[in-house]
Amino acid sequence: MQQHYIQREWPPRTGYITGQHSVKSEPLVSAQKVLLPPLHIKLGLMKNFVKALDKEGKAFQYLCTKFPKNSDAKIKEGIFVVPQIREVLRDTEFVSTLEVKELRAWKAFTQICANFLGNFRADNSALIVQELLDAYQKLGCRMSLKIHFLNSHLDFFPPNLGDVSDEHGERFHQDISQMEQNYQGRWNPSMMGDFCWMLVRDKSDTEHKRKSMKSHF
């Protein structure tokens, strides 16, 4: 996992080997059409930060006290909702409980929220992202998919991130939840095809409804 913080260029695989994470077919969606909602990036960064905290340290114990309704399991996994993250960002007492490495990572997180993950893009945004990566690596945060995008794919982030609707991500979660219920948690190779056809049917139904509404007017 540490190699992900060092290596940025990952050449595409040329072969398909059973049992390995290799790509056999072209992706269904063009890379230029992939949207990264800033809300989900923030949630992922917060999650990795809290999971890397010392569970016996002052900062982690402070979070347990600050959010008593959250279970210990949720706090250990860094699962927080947006209002809670905003509350911690405004809390100066939480900052005083952080150790040196934790404080550096937290300041980097606040900087990237204010100067990158929004409609305002600072001129030194690349340096801000790099500081976050360095601080998270020093703290021992694991390289998640969301951190990987910040590390290797900054071109995926448009300058107006604040205008990207988080409804796209929420709709995806709802669709996947429905698929999980249909398959009752069992893995099946036809699940992806079923999911794609469900999107096609939803699109056709939506277009049909729009045409019907226009005909009435």
Image: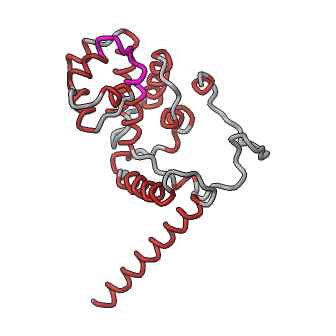
Q: Nearer the viewer, residue 183 or 210?
A: 183
Q: Looking at the picture, how far across and down is residue 56, in whole percent?
A: 34, 11
Instruction: Name the colour scheme.
Output: secondary structure
Q: Nearer the viewer, residue 137 or 115?
A: 137
Q: Looking at the picture, how far across and down is residue 85, in whole percent?
A: 27, 32
Residue 51 magenta: yes
Query: In the image, is residue 55 above or below residue 190?
Result: above
Residue shown at the point (29%, 38%) measured from the top left: 81
Residue shown at the point (67%, 35%) measured from the top left: 10
Q: Which residues are magenta?
A: 48-59
Query: In the image, is residue 77 above or below residue 65?
Result: below
Displayed quadrant of residue 111: top left
Image label count:
0
Residue shown at the point (63%, 24%) measured from the top left: 3
Name the quadrant of the N terminus: top right
Residue shown at the point (49%, 32%) measured from the top left: 147
Q: Is residue 216 left or right of residue 54?
A: left
Name the quadrant of the C terminus: bottom left
Q: Nearer the viewer, residue 48 or 191?
A: 191
Q: Looking at the picture, how far across and down is residue 64, in whole percent?
A: 26, 22
Q: Looking at the picture, how far across and down is residue 77, in whole percent?
A: 39, 29
Residue 189 magenta: no
Query: In the image, is residue 82 above or below residue 68?
Result: below
